Amino acid sequence: MNVVHNTPVSVVTIERFIIEQERLYPEASGELSGVLYDLALAAKMIANKVRMAGLVDILGGNETENVQGEAQQKLDVIANDIMIKAMDHGGRLCAMASEEEPDIIPIPDGFRCGKYCLMFDPLDGSSNIDVNVPVGTIFSVVRKVTRGSAGEMEDFLQPGRRQVAAGYVIYGSSTMLVYTTGQGVHGFTLDPSIGEFLLSHPNIRTPERGKFLSVNDSYEQHWEEPVRALMRRYRGMDGVQKAMNVRYVGSLVADFHRNLLGGGIFVYPANAKSPRGKLRLLYEANPLAFIAEQAGGAASDGYQRILDINPSELHQRTPLYMGSKADVETVHEFLTPAGVTA
């Protein structure tokens, strides 16, 4: 009787993966690895809160507004607090900035300051929590550029091309953490039975041209004509290309994640109601653009590469066209020569 021995599949935890990546760079201090460890821990804690949302009193609004003037959900506040408390004591960060906070978040007295700055959207798409739609966390890490120990505004107002790490966590049917340090994009799925993120999507590559179009059509009446013409192209209405499938969740992380894996483009143009765009450059556009490019995609504001924009304020907004490279190049065909508001 022949006995077949199946070769066991190597189990790679996020910690093991980060350590192996760090070994490729003998000069690495380990501080950035520590930031990523802490972010993975924060993601597990937020995932637990999201999973319990229907069973405890953390659904619904908080009767407060964030710095953007948007109504905060209870989970927004909880996730924001978790991120801050998980990250402020490790000695690796000099300051943080959150979409939910008006100013830079300093490292508390008594804790050592490090050489990195962290920017994050603690719970993107949180208004969807009540209807059980996937939500996410987005983060961006840059190196400190000022001389003092504490983080300053100049440290945060750097173009996205200077990011040293970026990623997101999607809390859906499973919890996934996807990140890049400029050496490709890798995805890890949380195994709740052991409480570990396991490598499930190594070296993610997005298709050159995609099949999904993610756009909120309710703003069409406020778009300029070149933007409407662009949407007609994507829908195959001008006969030039095959129609894309319209898929819009209304949760940026969920829409981006689907398009990253399946190919497609996420579109949020400027419009008459939001002439500067809606999405935040530092907390949403930059980190996801970094991931898109590392996976072979692209991201633009309609005129230029997102990662080349020089920020002027902490909560700066931007139009955003992001996804498969060929689909983003189509944006410039329609908008850049027209000189319209992207």
Image (spheres, grey):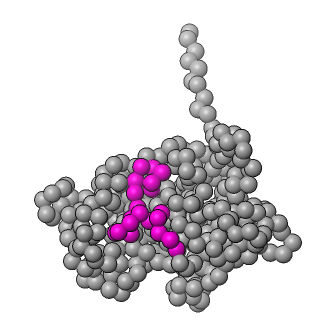
Q: Please report the bounds of the magenta region as a residue range.
A: 292-311
Is residue 277 shown in magenta?
no
Residue drawn at x 87%, y 72% as measured from the top left: 110
Name the one closer to the observer, 334 or 110. Answer: 334
The residue at the far top in this view is 1
Residue at image x 52%, y 49%? 185
Q: How many marks?
A: 0
Residue 74 vs residue 241: left or right? right
Establish if 127 lies above or below 163. Answer: below
Image quadrant holding the C terminus, namely bottom left
Q: Identify which residue is drawn at 25% across, 63% down.
A: 333
Where in the figure is residue 246, as x and y percent of width and height?
Answer: 29, 64
Q: Quadrant of residue 109?
A: bottom right
Question: What residue is at 53 percent from the left and 84 percent from the top?
Answer: 68
Task: Tell me, yes or no, if residue 244 can be seen here.
Answer: yes
Q: Could you tell me if residue 41 is visible in this image?
A: no
Residue extending furthest toward the left: 239
Furthest toward the right, the residue is 110
Residue 159: percent from left, percent from top: 53, 66
Rendered position, 199 above or below 122: above
Q: Residue pushed farthest front?
A: 147
Which quadrant of the figure contains the N terminus?
top right
Relative to the observer, which residue lies in front, 109 or 313?
313
Q: In this image, 224 relative to 153: left or right?
A: left
Q: Position of residue 84 (x, y in %)?
A: 70, 71
Q: Position of residue 196 (x, y in %)?
A: 66, 49
Viewer-proximal residue among 112 and 38: 112
Left or right of residue 19, residue 68 in this image = left
Relative vertical location of residue 19 with respect to residue 159 in this rendering, above or below? above
